[in-house]
Amino acid sequence: MKNGLIALLMATTLFPVAAEGKNARCVIKQEGATAYSGACDFQMDQGGSFGIRRHDAKPILPNITDISVFIVSTGVAEVRGLTTDGINSRWGRAIRSQQDPACWKGSEFEICAY
């Protein structure tokens, strides 16, 4: 029972976009180039954490259906992507942008949700 509850809590925390989110505009950059710019569902979670996915249920990036930004401390987040194979891929740490607070920058990616 305890392990099942822990797994459920982890799933809802890492990928809060299971429910339909609010309409937003998302911009995702990889290695400085825009990989996605367009409409997305934005699902807010506790403590400022959030998840994004496309409205039409297509992958938001090649082989990535959902992206989660989990706040670990003020201005610092852990970013993960859910692959089309169901693998929870760790993208790494991201820092909130000083210039645009809607954006989170990692070493090889940037995620903005407006």
Image: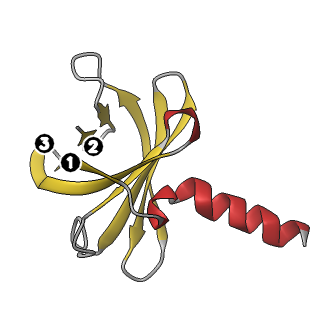
Residue visible at 47% across and 79% down?
86
Location of residue 114 with respect to 82 vertically, above or below: above
Q: Earlier in the sequence, mark 1 or mark 3?
A: 1
Residues at marks 2 and 1 touching, judged by CB atoms closer than 8 Å: yes
Where is mark 2, residue-wise? 111
| Furthest residue in direction bottom, as rendered | 85
Marks 1/3 in contact by CB < 8 Å: the verdict is: no
Say whether residue 83 is left or right of residue 26.
right
Single out the residue that lies furthest toward the right.
Answer: 1
Q: Quadrant of the N terminus?
A: bottom right
The residue to which callout 1 is attached is 26
Tell me the kind of residue under disc 1: Cys
State the SS at label 2. strand
Position of 29 with respect to 77 (left or right) is: left
> Mark 1 and mark 3: span between their CA atoms?
15 Å
Residue type beneath disc 3: Gly
